[in-house]
Amino acid sequence: MRCTQFNDLLLICGEVLLGNYKLKAELTIDGLEILEGENIDIPNTFYVKNRHKIIQFLDENPGEESSWCESIKNVIKDYKVRKPSVRAGELPPCNGGEVSENDLGNVAPHWIKDDEVSMCQLCSKSFTALKRRHHCRACGRVVCGKCSSKKSNLAYDNNKPNRVCDKCFVILKNVDGKVVDQKVPKGVKLMNANDPSILSGYLQKSMDRGKTWNKRWFVITKEFAMYEFKAHHDIYAIATLPLPGYQVIFPVDNIENVFCLSHQQKLPPTYLQSECTASRDRWLNVLKKMVNLELPEESNRNSTHSSESSGSQNAEDGCDKMS
């Protein structure tokens, strides 16, 4: 492939015989975005995305000023200076798993990152070395091969056939069909880890007084329950903790930012550790209310993130969110 970059246009060409090139894609700089690559096997990849197309590139000179990634970023920056009216916010949101039915297939979605999901977002089966992750090219969800075995022509990719999930396939084809049932283990709640909640965020969890820790996404709801997820885009909780009857203990053995939930009936205590003091205080303030069947005041709650991209960033940074 060969790229040619102008001050308002990016041409992507495929090489053919005798040194000639065939135009594969034409992307205007207006509305163009650079996204971080997600290819685990091949480092230094990045995405170039506009409203109708998303293309992955391999940067052979990462970090250098002459690299393609840096060059395109500079062109986008210069273009916005020359045309102040251009703003990324002018484009309609195309967040992973949140593309509207009207835009489905017409707009390139923003892919949910692999490490933000531990299970198929349709059938909820856990990913393993053999059960690989796949992205639906229509909505951006992370699904298994069984739930994305079909292809559909997508308008944003010049009507070429692309892998789509079963749910999008039914919508795009407008056919009668059954979407794969979301199966969850017995006794757990089917819900999205990033649904609106009183408080949610990543915490380190230990059940052996701090000898071993596991990073988990926790969600506290107005039903006075705390749900535990492996990742913040999962579709069911792996554990549920009814908060009434528990006692919040802090500090714990003088370990920084660690607090404990201990039950009166001598159930195994749960040790939790936050990323920072501010995060720890938010969790303590909410939990101390909830264990006593009290809802925290609205003034103590932060607003839920307004976009998927900001939500992902908050999750990566270990921050909490409150609604």
Image (cartoon, grey):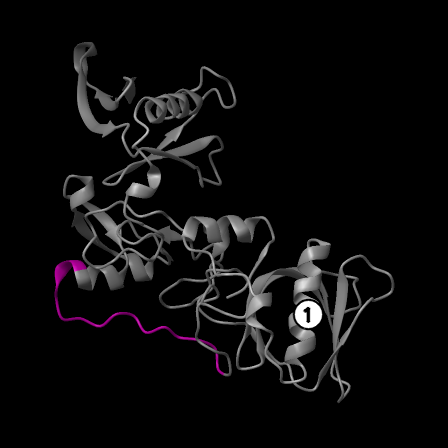
Image x and y of residue 119, in percent? 45, 62
- Residue 177 among those drawn in magenta: yes
Image height of 296 relative to 62, above or below: below
Find disc 1 in the rendering and name its residue.
285
Check disc 1: other Cα within 10 Å, few if <14, some if 14-19, many if 20+. few
Q: Quadrant of residue 253?
A: bottom right
Was residue 250 drawn as part of the magenta stretch in this picture?
A: no
- From the viewer's perspective, tell me whether residue 154 is left or right of residue 184: left
177 or 209: nearer the viewer? 209
* Residue at position x 68%, y 70% in the image: 285
Figure quadrant of residue 76:
top left
- Quarter of the figure that contains the N terminus: top left
Q: Residue at x 83, y 59 (%)?
A: 255
Q: Secondary structure at mark 1?
A: helix
Is residue 6 found left or right of 301 in the rendered image? left
Q: Residue at x 18, y 62 (%)?
A: 171
Q: Which amino acid type corresponds to the residue marked 1 in the rendered image? A: Asn
* Left or right of 64 on screen, residue 263: right
Image height of 7 relative to 302, above or below: above
In this view, the residue in front, 153 or 11, is 11
Q: Nearer the viewer, residue 151 or 297?
A: 297
Looking at the image, which residue sits at the far right? 253
Percent coordinates x, y for residue 156 in the rendering = 19, 42
Give the main secondary structure of the magenta stretch.
loop
Magenta residues?
A: 172-186
